[in-house]
């Protein structure tokens, strides 16, 4: 594999590496900061899909790799045509790959706080919550997460 191909592949993979929007994942800047804790009871849990916007890295990387692979087929005009077809196919495949990586299962968790207020929080579906369960809502003013 040529050096530009390796660079494009690395860029494609780097674009897909993101931390999940989970109630169990903290970024480094979120540590050692105080959070407000409220207690409540789960009213309902609804399955949702969490979609991160496409960055275009999958499409561009797939098109570049497909174009490079296609251009090695044939000679002259045939090589150019194969490169174009490879770029289009690679771009479509790269776009679908990025979209499938960016879509994650989530829960919309509706909680009735002990104060009587009703709150709904959406987060990754990596921890099961059931109606009637007592939970904590942790909030730093910008983001709220539900935990047991």
Image (spheres, rainbow, N blue to C red):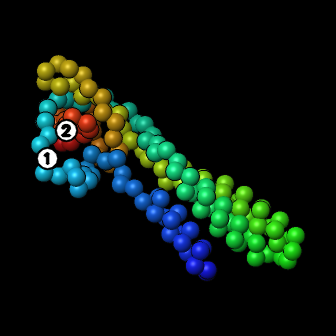
The quarter of the picture where residue 139 lies is: top left
**Residue 86 vertical placement versus 29 (above, below):** below
Image-based side of 121 in relation to 96, left or right: left
The answer to whether residue 132 shows anywhere in this view is no
Q: Are marks 2 and 1 in contact (CB under 8 Å)?
A: yes
| Quadrant of the image containing the N terminus | bottom right
Label tally:
2
Image-based side of 142 in relation to 7, left or right: left
Q: Residue at x 43, y 41 (%)?
A: 50
Question: Residue 69 at x, y = what percent?
Answer: 70, 72
Identify the element where label 1 is drawn.
loop
Q: Residue at x 21, y 34 (%)?
A: 141
Q: Residue at x 13, y 36 (%)?
A: 36
Q: Which residue position is annotated with label 2?
A: 140
Identify the element where label 2 is drawn.
loop
The answer to whether residue 143 shows anywhere in this view is yes
Q: Residue at x 17, y 25 (%)?
A: 113
Q: Residue furthest top?
A: 116
Where residue 11 is drawn, which disc sits there?
none
The quarter of the picture where residue 75 lies is: bottom right
Q: Earlier in the sequence, mark 2 or mark 1?
A: 1
Report the Cα–Cα distance between label 2 and label 1.
8 Å
Q: Which residue position is annotated with label 1?
A: 33
The quarter of the picture where residue 145 lies is: top left
Nearer to the camera, 117 or 2: 2
Q: Residues within 10 Å of mark 2 (few under 14, many from 20)?
A: few
Question: Residue 65 at x, y = what percent?
Answer: 64, 68
Image-based side of 105 in relation to 40, left or right: right
């Amino acid at each position: 594999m040529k050096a530009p191909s390796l660079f494009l592949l690395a860029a494609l993979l780097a674009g897909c590496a993101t931390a999940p929007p989970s109630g169990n994942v903290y970024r480094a800047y979120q540590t050692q900061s105080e959070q407000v804790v409220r207690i409540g009871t789960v009213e309902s849990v609804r399955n949702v899909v969490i979609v991160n916007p496409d960055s275009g890295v999958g499409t561009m990387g797939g098109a570049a790799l497909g174009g490079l692979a296609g251009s090695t087929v044939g000679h002259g005009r045939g090589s150019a045509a194969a490169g174009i077809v490879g770029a289009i196919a690679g771009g479509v495949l790269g776009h679908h790959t990025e979209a499938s990586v960016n879509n994650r299962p989530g829960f919309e968790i509706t909680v009735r706080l002990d104060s009587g207020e009703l709150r709904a929080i959406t987060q990754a579906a990596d921890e099961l919550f059931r109606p009637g369960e007592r939970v904590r809502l942790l909030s730093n003013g910008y983001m709220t997460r539900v935990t047991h």
